[in-house]
Image (cartoon, helix red, strand yellow):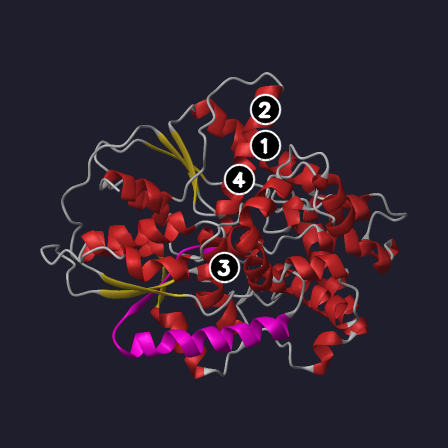
Amino acid sequence: MSEGSLEAPIRHPIDWNNPDFYDGEKLDQELRRVFDICHGCRRCFNLCDTFPKLFDLIDDSETGELDSVSSENFKPAVDACTLCDMCFMTKCPYVPPHEFNLDFPHLMLRYRAIEHRNGQIPFATRQITETDRNGKIARPVAGLMNWGTKTENKLTRPLMQAFSGIDKEADLPKYQAKTISSQFKTTKSRVNKAAPAFGRKAVLYATCFVNYNNSKIGFAAEKVLSINGVDTELIYPKCCGMPKLEHGDIAAVATNAKEVATSLLPWVDKGYDVIALIPSCALMLKFEWPLILPDNENIKRLSEATKDISEYIVEISKNEGLADGMVSTPRPVTLHLACHARAQNMGPKAAEMLKLLPDADVKVIERCSGHGGSWGMMKENFDTALKIGKPVARTALEKNSSEVVSECPLAGVHIRQGMKQLKEEGDEGGIPDTAPHPIEILAKSYGF
């Protein structure tokens, strides 16, 4: 046996079609095996709230070991996992090919998959994961929805908290009256034939967030790509399934993956690269889908053709060079690297991209914002999410930057909320009005 982290980590397919995957007794055996190894290591003690909960549970037990901990008490530790993958990617020395064979996030996913199969996921929680349905319902009444979800609305937010479990103080993303899919063809930019990268073709996978909540990200990406000579199209078949994955509905994720792949692969066959605009969605297409459907050749082909938007811009800069025309933007810029961008194992591409700006002054924060998808907005998690994200918010406040940006829009909203809380507690520093995606800063530099 050798110490871990000496070889490149590998990840095994998720065996969700095997009946043993849903066997509660076998799950408990694996939980105890893995938790005992984590108890002896404790390298992840400061990574998220899962590990402190687990270690406190063991330390407070009768023997101070796992043997005196009841399996029924595991749930709080499991529920605290946001599936960010950081323990697997950056901390754990026992991931495959080490013989201990630990994949902590996917073990938590297995726990939730059993809960989902047993009907233990609350009704309201399941409704939150229906991003496409919710977006379609909200679009015609976007103004009313946004009024109702304001934290200042003391009439609707307590009612929403009671029904859905979403904390009444949590800032929520806004809905837009028009989807980006409905606007895109009439707003396309002319492709710059003089750009060094002219001849490239890319199709943007809009993602549910860009389609229903913030089309600025998609338009910024299209404009930056067009001025750099990339013939750009946009498509949005449906959600990547990340919200459903968080709650163990793996079958629904597999269904979404097949439908999205069916829509995107014809573009790949025509020579287009696939660009995902949100890190969580890029992670799904590139890594999670192939582990859920390892024998599906379409999923494999799509995975190989997909890039994150920041990754793609950096690739153009290195291979062909970027088009002229960028000007200095307000500086400095504080950049939060999203966990799901880091989990793609591609390096800090958003930081590399922003450093291409003239007179770039980029301050990078490489730490969890605390949000964790829908996890951080729930009543039982919101205060913890702010606590976990406080170092990020404090660093952003101290840097007093003209822009605070994050690859993850939900993380950006959460960071700004943490900054506001610190200001109320007496910390000094400026808070920008928004927390845009890095591609929006690049678009601004090009004059858009």
Nearer to us: label 2 or label 4:
4
Q: Quadrant of residue 191?
A: bottom left
Decide if residue 134 is on the left or right side of residue 188: right
Nearer to us: label 3 or label 1:
3
Q: Nearer the viewer, residue 246 or 182?
A: 182
* Magenta stretch: dominant secondary structure: helix
Compared to residue 342, the image places residue 396 above or below, namely: above
Q: Tags 4 and 1 in contact by the CB under 8 Å rule?
A: no
Amino acid bearing label 1 = Lys
Q: Which residue corresponds to mark 3?
A: 208
Residue 413: image tag: 4
Amino acid bearing label 4 = Val
Return the disc, 3 or 1, that comes first in the chain's sequence: 3
Cα–Cα span, label 2 and label 4:
15 Å
Counting from the top left corner in percent of width and height, residue 3 is at 55, 57
Cα–Cα span, label 3 and label 4:
17 Å
Q: Tags 1 and 2 in contact by the CB under 8 Å rule?
A: yes
Return the disc, 1 or 2, that comes first in the chain's sequence: 1
Q: Which residue corresponds to mark 2?
A: 422
Cα–Cα span, label 1 and label 2:
8 Å
Return the disc, 2 or 3, that comes first in the chain's sequence: 3
- The residue segment tinted magenta is 250-279
Q: Which residue corresponds to mark 1?
A: 390
Q: Nearer the viewer, residue 16 or 32?
A: 16
Q: Quadrant of residue 445?
A: top left
